[in-house]
Amino acid sequence: MAYRCEAVSIDGLVQQIAVSYLRHGYLYYVTGMLPDGKDPHALDAKLIDRYGIAISERERARRKLSGLANMQYIRHGQFFVLLCTEGRHVFREIERDVIRDAREVPIRIPKEARARCKKHYASGPKNFEGYAVSYRRGHYQRKTAEEKSQYREERASGLRPPRGTKDEQWRSRVEIERRTYKRLRAYFLNIAGQHSVEHLARELQAIPYQPYAPIRQQLLGLVRDINVVRRVAGRKDEVPYEALNLKRLQIQPFVSSGSVERDEAANSGA
Protein backbone atom coordinates (compact mmCIF):
# COMPACT_ATOMS: atom_id res chain seq x y z
CA MET A 1 0.00 0.00 0.00
CA ALA A 2 1.26 3.46 -0.92
CA TYR A 3 2.17 5.71 1.98
CA ARG A 4 -0.76 8.05 2.68
CA CYS A 5 0.29 11.54 3.67
CA GLU A 6 -2.25 14.02 2.26
CA ALA A 7 -4.90 14.91 4.82
CA VAL A 8 -8.28 15.99 3.51
CA SER A 9 -8.56 18.79 6.08
CA ILE A 10 -6.63 20.59 8.79
CA ASP A 11 -8.92 18.98 11.37
CA GLY A 12 -8.00 15.57 9.96
CA LEU A 13 -4.31 16.49 10.10
CA VAL A 14 -4.65 17.58 13.74
CA GLN A 15 -6.46 14.37 14.66
CA GLN A 16 -3.88 12.15 12.96
CA ILE A 17 -0.98 13.87 14.71
CA ALA A 18 -2.63 13.95 18.15
CA VAL A 19 -4.30 10.54 18.14
CA SER A 20 -1.91 8.42 16.07
CA TYR A 21 1.54 9.97 15.91
CA LEU A 22 2.37 11.67 19.22
CA ARG A 23 1.06 8.79 21.31
CA HIS A 24 3.35 6.41 19.40
CA GLY A 25 6.47 8.42 20.18
CA TYR A 26 6.72 10.73 17.15
CA LEU A 27 7.59 13.69 19.37
CA TYR A 28 10.29 15.52 17.39
CA TYR A 29 8.98 17.62 14.55
CA VAL A 30 9.57 20.21 11.87
CA THR A 31 6.77 22.18 10.22
CA GLY A 32 6.84 24.00 6.92
CA MET A 33 4.77 25.79 4.31
CA LEU A 34 5.09 25.08 0.62
CA PRO A 35 5.60 28.27 -1.44
CA ASP A 36 2.93 29.28 -3.95
CA GLY A 37 3.34 27.68 -7.35
CA LYS A 38 5.16 24.56 -6.09
CA ASP A 39 3.78 21.08 -6.75
CA PRO A 40 2.78 19.60 -3.35
CA HIS A 41 2.85 16.02 -4.64
CA ALA A 42 6.42 16.49 -5.83
CA LEU A 43 7.32 17.68 -2.30
CA ASP A 44 5.59 14.62 -0.82
CA ALA A 45 7.60 12.25 -3.01
CA LYS A 46 10.85 14.11 -2.35
CA LEU A 47 10.57 14.06 1.45
CA ILE A 48 9.24 10.51 1.68
CA ASP A 49 12.14 9.28 -0.48
CA ARG A 50 14.83 11.41 1.21
CA TYR A 51 14.01 10.19 4.71
CA GLY A 52 12.86 6.67 3.89
CA ILE A 53 9.43 7.20 5.45
CA ALA A 54 7.38 4.69 3.41
CA ILE A 55 8.44 1.50 5.18
CA SER A 56 6.51 -1.46 6.57
CA GLU A 57 5.49 -1.92 10.20
CA ARG A 58 7.98 -4.78 10.47
CA GLU A 59 10.78 -2.48 9.34
CA ARG A 60 9.68 0.20 11.80
CA ALA A 61 9.76 -2.35 14.61
CA ARG A 62 13.22 -3.56 13.54
CA ARG A 63 14.58 -0.01 13.45
CA LYS A 64 13.15 0.74 16.88
CA LEU A 65 14.85 -2.32 18.39
CA SER A 66 18.13 -1.26 16.74
CA GLY A 67 18.03 2.22 18.29
CA LEU A 68 17.13 3.89 15.00
CA ALA A 69 14.39 6.49 14.64
CA ASN A 70 11.24 6.20 12.52
CA MET A 71 9.45 9.02 10.75
CA GLN A 72 6.00 10.12 9.66
CA TYR A 73 4.99 12.84 7.22
CA ILE A 74 1.62 14.53 6.75
CA ARG A 75 0.44 17.47 4.67
CA HIS A 76 -2.71 19.42 3.94
CA GLY A 77 -2.66 22.11 1.30
CA GLN A 78 0.60 23.99 1.61
CA PHE A 79 1.26 23.09 5.25
CA PHE A 80 3.25 19.98 6.19
CA VAL A 81 4.73 18.33 9.27
CA LEU A 82 7.64 15.89 9.54
CA LEU A 83 7.73 13.86 12.77
CA CYS A 84 10.43 11.62 14.19
CA THR A 85 10.87 9.25 17.13
CA GLU A 86 13.82 8.94 19.50
CA GLY A 87 16.93 7.41 17.93
CA ARG A 88 19.49 7.91 15.17
CA HIS A 89 18.27 9.22 11.82
CA VAL A 90 19.68 11.37 9.02
CA PHE A 91 16.68 13.70 9.51
CA ARG A 92 17.91 14.60 12.99
CA GLU A 93 21.28 15.58 11.55
CA ILE A 94 19.99 17.59 8.60
CA GLU A 95 17.30 19.45 10.55
CA ARG A 96 19.02 19.62 13.96
CA ASP A 97 18.81 23.43 14.12
CA VAL A 98 15.04 23.57 13.61
CA ILE A 99 13.74 20.35 15.19
CA ARG A 100 11.40 20.89 18.14
CA ASP A 101 10.12 18.56 20.86
CA ALA A 102 6.31 18.44 21.19
CA ARG A 103 6.73 17.97 24.96
CA GLU A 104 8.39 21.39 25.17
CA VAL A 105 7.13 23.42 22.20
CA PRO A 106 3.59 22.84 20.87
CA ILE A 107 3.10 22.16 17.18
CA ARG A 108 1.39 25.28 15.81
CA ILE A 109 -1.01 24.17 13.08
CA PRO A 110 -2.73 26.94 11.08
CA LYS A 111 -6.50 26.73 10.59
CA GLU A 112 -6.01 27.47 6.91
CA ALA A 113 -3.18 25.61 5.18
CA ARG A 114 -2.11 28.40 2.86
CA ALA A 115 0.63 31.00 2.92
CA ARG A 116 -0.35 34.37 4.38
CA CYS A 117 2.65 36.26 3.07
CA LYS A 118 5.28 35.95 0.36
CA LYS A 119 8.10 34.80 2.63
CA HIS A 120 6.61 32.18 4.95
CA TYR A 121 3.32 31.26 6.56
CA ALA A 122 4.74 31.81 10.06
CA SER A 123 5.39 35.47 9.39
CA GLY A 124 4.75 36.21 13.04
CA PRO A 125 2.46 35.33 15.94
CA LYS A 126 0.13 38.21 15.12
CA ASN A 127 -0.78 36.59 11.79
CA PHE A 128 -1.18 33.04 13.11
CA GLU A 129 -4.59 31.49 13.71
CA GLY A 130 -4.95 27.83 14.57
CA TYR A 131 -4.30 24.93 16.87
CA ALA A 132 -1.51 24.16 19.34
CA VAL A 133 -0.83 20.42 19.61
CA SER A 134 1.52 19.16 22.33
CA TYR A 135 2.36 16.06 24.33
CA ARG A 136 2.42 16.52 28.09
CA ARG A 137 1.22 15.13 31.37
CA GLY A 138 -2.51 15.32 31.96
CA HIS A 139 -4.24 18.14 33.82
CA TYR A 140 -6.54 16.56 36.40
CA GLN A 141 -8.18 13.16 36.55
CA ARG A 142 -11.89 13.08 35.85
CA LYS A 143 -14.04 13.23 38.99
CA THR A 144 -16.78 10.74 39.74
CA ALA A 145 -20.35 12.00 40.26
CA GLU A 146 -19.89 11.74 44.04
CA GLU A 147 -16.62 13.68 43.93
CA LYS A 148 -18.25 16.40 41.82
CA SER A 149 -21.15 16.68 44.26
CA GLN A 150 -18.80 16.90 47.24
CA TYR A 151 -16.65 19.50 45.45
CA ARG A 152 -19.70 21.71 44.78
CA GLU A 153 -20.92 21.41 48.38
CA GLU A 154 -17.53 22.43 49.76
CA ARG A 155 -17.32 25.38 47.37
CA ALA A 156 -20.86 26.48 48.31
CA SER A 157 -19.93 26.37 52.01
CA GLY A 158 -17.03 28.76 51.44
CA LEU A 159 -14.24 26.20 51.48
CA ARG A 160 -11.54 25.97 48.82
CA PRO A 161 -11.17 22.23 48.09
CA PRO A 162 -8.39 21.02 45.77
CA ARG A 163 -9.36 20.92 42.11
CA GLY A 164 -8.67 17.19 41.95
CA THR A 165 -5.97 14.58 41.57
CA LYS A 166 -3.16 15.39 39.15
CA ASP A 167 -3.02 13.13 36.10
CA GLU A 168 0.60 12.02 35.71
CA GLN A 169 0.06 10.13 32.46
CA TRP A 170 1.46 11.59 29.23
CA ARG A 171 -1.26 12.59 26.77
CA SER A 172 -1.72 14.44 23.51
CA ARG A 173 -3.18 17.89 24.12
CA VAL A 174 -5.01 19.89 21.44
CA GLU A 175 -5.85 23.52 22.23
CA ILE A 176 -6.75 26.70 20.43
CA GLU A 177 -3.35 28.37 20.17
CA ARG A 178 -2.83 30.88 23.00
CA ARG A 179 -2.71 34.11 20.96
CA THR A 180 -5.55 32.89 18.75
CA TYR A 181 -7.69 32.24 21.84
CA LYS A 182 -6.86 35.65 23.30
CA ARG A 183 -8.05 37.37 20.12
CA LEU A 184 -11.19 35.21 20.04
CA ARG A 185 -11.92 35.99 23.69
CA ALA A 186 -11.35 39.73 23.19
CA TYR A 187 -13.81 39.73 20.29
CA PHE A 188 -16.57 38.01 22.27
CA LEU A 189 -16.09 40.11 25.40
CA ASN A 190 -16.30 43.23 23.26
CA ILE A 191 -19.73 42.27 21.89
CA ALA A 192 -21.04 40.36 24.93
CA GLY A 193 -22.99 43.24 26.44
CA GLN A 194 -24.32 44.59 23.15
CA HIS A 195 -25.92 41.68 21.35
CA SER A 196 -28.74 39.25 22.08
CA VAL A 197 -28.25 35.74 23.41
CA GLU A 198 -29.37 34.36 20.03
CA HIS A 199 -26.73 36.38 18.16
CA LEU A 200 -23.97 35.31 20.55
CA ALA A 201 -25.10 31.68 20.33
CA ARG A 202 -24.80 31.78 16.55
CA GLU A 203 -21.32 33.28 16.83
CA LEU A 204 -20.26 30.59 19.31
CA GLN A 205 -21.63 27.84 17.05
CA ALA A 206 -19.49 29.21 14.21
CA ILE A 207 -16.17 28.81 16.08
CA PRO A 208 -14.27 26.51 13.68
CA TYR A 209 -12.33 24.30 16.09
CA GLN A 210 -12.90 20.64 16.92
CA PRO A 211 -13.77 20.49 20.65
CA TYR A 212 -11.02 18.31 22.11
CA ALA A 213 -11.14 18.29 25.92
CA PRO A 214 -8.75 21.28 26.40
CA ILE A 215 -10.67 23.24 23.77
CA ARG A 216 -13.94 22.45 25.52
CA GLN A 217 -12.47 23.94 28.68
CA GLN A 218 -11.41 27.04 26.74
CA LEU A 219 -14.90 27.44 25.26
CA LEU A 220 -16.68 26.86 28.59
CA GLY A 221 -14.45 29.51 30.17
CA LEU A 222 -15.31 31.84 27.29
CA VAL A 223 -19.05 31.49 27.95
CA ARG A 224 -18.49 32.12 31.68
CA ASP A 225 -16.61 35.33 30.88
CA ILE A 226 -19.29 36.41 28.38
CA ASN A 227 -21.99 36.05 31.06
CA VAL A 228 -19.92 38.02 33.57
CA VAL A 229 -19.70 40.89 31.09
CA ARG A 230 -23.45 40.66 30.43
CA ARG A 231 -24.24 40.87 34.15
CA VAL A 232 -22.00 43.92 34.55
CA ALA A 233 -23.74 45.51 31.56
CA GLY A 234 -27.14 44.97 33.21
CA ARG A 235 -28.24 42.12 30.94
CA LYS A 236 -30.41 39.64 32.80
CA ASP A 237 -30.38 36.85 30.19
CA GLU A 238 -27.27 34.68 30.01
CA VAL A 239 -25.78 32.65 27.20
CA PRO A 240 -26.43 28.94 27.92
CA TYR A 241 -23.58 26.45 27.72
CA GLU A 242 -25.75 24.46 25.31
CA ALA A 243 -24.91 27.12 22.72
CA LEU A 244 -21.49 25.50 22.35
CA ASN A 245 -20.76 22.63 20.01
CA LEU A 246 -18.99 20.21 22.38
CA LYS A 247 -19.16 17.03 20.30
CA ARG A 248 -16.00 16.20 18.38
CA LEU A 249 -16.20 14.52 14.99
CA GLN A 250 -14.16 11.38 14.37
CA ILE A 251 -12.53 11.89 10.97
CA GLN A 252 -10.85 9.55 8.51
CA PRO A 253 -8.02 11.97 7.69
CA PHE A 254 -6.85 10.33 4.46
CA VAL A 255 -10.22 9.51 2.86
CA SER A 256 -10.68 11.71 -0.20
CA SER A 257 -14.48 11.46 -0.03
CA GLY A 258 -14.35 13.39 3.25
CA SER A 259 -16.80 11.03 4.95
CA VAL A 260 -16.85 11.28 8.74
CA GLU A 261 -16.39 7.93 10.47
CA ARG A 262 -14.21 6.40 13.15
CA ASP A 263 -10.56 6.88 12.31
CA GLU A 264 -8.66 3.77 11.28
CA ALA A 265 -5.45 5.28 12.68
CA ALA A 266 -3.72 4.83 9.35
CA ASN A 267 0.06 5.01 9.33
CA SER A 268 0.26 4.59 13.13
CA GLY A 269 3.66 3.19 14.07
CA ALA A 270 5.29 1.35 16.92
Image: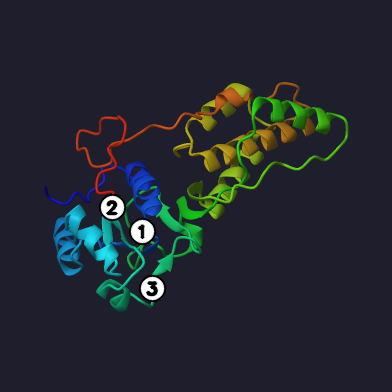
Name the residue nearer the viewer: 197 or 76: 76
Residue named by callout 3: 98
Q: How is the image coloured?
A: rainbow
Residue 91 in the image: state x and y as whole percent: 28, 72
Comparing marks 2 and 3, which lies closer to the viewer? 2
Tags 1 and 2 in contact by the CB under 8 Å rule?
A: yes
What label sits on residue 26 in the rendered view?
1
Q: Amino acid at mark 3?
A: Val
Q: Amino acid at mark 1?
A: Tyr
User: Residue at 66% of width from left, 40% of height from top?
Assistant: 189
Q: Is residue 119 left or right of residue 43?
A: right
Residue named by callout 2: 269
Distance between mark 2 and mark 3 Cα atoms: 23 Å
Residue 132 in the image: state x and y as whole percent: 47, 53
Q: In the orientation shown, which residue stands out farthest toward the right?
A: 158
Task: Name above or below for residue 162 compared with residue 236.
Answer: below
Comparing marks 1 and 3, which lies closer to the viewer? 1
- Report whether residue 197 is seen: yes
Distance between mark 1 and mark 2 Cα atoms: 9 Å
Q: Is residue 74 left or right of residue 235?
A: left
User: Residue at 49% of width from left, 61% of height from top?
Assistant: 103
Residue 8 in the image: state x and y as whole percent: 26, 42
Name the residue nearer the viewer: 55 or 270: 270
Q: Amino acid at mark 2?
A: Gly
Tell me the crowding category of disc 3: few under 14, some 14 to 19, or many 20 or more residues within 10 angstroms, Cα based.
few
Quadrant of residue 155 in the image? top right
Mark 1 or mark 3: which comes first in sequence?
A: 1
What label sits on residue 124 in the rendered view?
none
Distance between mark 1 and mark 3 Cα atoms: 16 Å
